[in-house]
Each structure stands twice: as C-alpha cells, then as structure tokens.
Amino acid sequence: MRVFTEERDWGQFHDPKSLILALVGEVGELAELFQWLPADAAVDRAREDRLHERAGEELADVLIYLVRLADVLDIDLADAALRKLRGSSARFPAEEVRGQAPDKS
Ligand SMILES: [Mg+2]
C-alpha cells in the first residue's frame, strides 16, 4: 500500500483524518451489503457467489485503508493486534466466559 501510494504521489492526501473517513466509508459499504438481510440468514446468504464476492471486495477495502492508516501513524498493526488479543485473553478467561456475551461494564 505504501509503494502503491508513493508511485501515485497520493501520500499528500493520506493524513489520518482523511484515511479514517475513507475507512469509515468502506465499513459503510460493507454494512450496506448486509443491512436488510435477516440476521439469522446473513451467514448463509454471504456464502452465495455474488454477495461473497462483494463482501470480499469491501473487506479488502477496509483492510487496505486500515493498513495504510497504521503505516501513516507508524503503528505496527500486527503487534498492536497481538497485544490487544493477549489483553482480551487475560480479561476474559475462556473457562469463565465460554458461551457468555462480554460484559459491557
Ligand atoms: Mg468499497
């Protein structure tokens, strides 16, 4: 993504605010694909060819902007995600929360 951006001299447009708005826009496009599907049918419908392809495209857009934002902010996204996952594992021990929705408090 960095090379793609540099080759096009688009880095000048990739301030954090603009990238966050682009990311949110792509999340919105992903949400739009599912917004009127019955919740209990969404997984099965998403396996159908057309929706599967479109969901993949929008997920890729989300990932691309997320990775670019992390790069601009000099955040090691893989390391940050692993740290978050370790924290969540400690906060929600599987043997204590298995099958329960996380407590929001
Ligand atoms: Mg898109």
Image: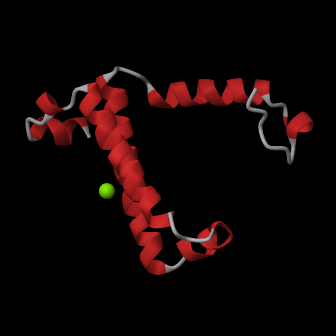
Instruction: Give residue 77's position: percent from left, percent from top.
Output: 46, 29
Residue 93's place in the image compared with 40, above or below, is above
Instruction: Give residue 64's position: percent from left, percent from top.
Output: 34, 45
Instruction: Give residue 105's position: percent from left, percent from top.
Output: 76, 26
Q: Specify the farthest residue to the front.
A: 36
Instruction: Give residue 82's position: percent from left, percent from top.
Output: 60, 29
Q: Residue at x 62, y 26 (%)?
A: 84
Q: Residue at x 47, y 71 (%)?
A: 52
Horizontal side of residue 59 vs 7, given as left or right: right
Image quadrant containing the N terminus: top left
Q: Residue at x 39, y 68 (%)?
A: 54
Q: Residue at x 78, y 24 (%)?
A: 90
Q: Quadrant of ligand 1?
A: bottom left
Residue 1's place in the image compared with 51, above or below, is above
Residue 49's place in the image compared with 20, above or below, is below
Q: Specify the farthest residue to the bottom.
A: 49
Horizontal side of residue 17 vs 84, given as left or right: left
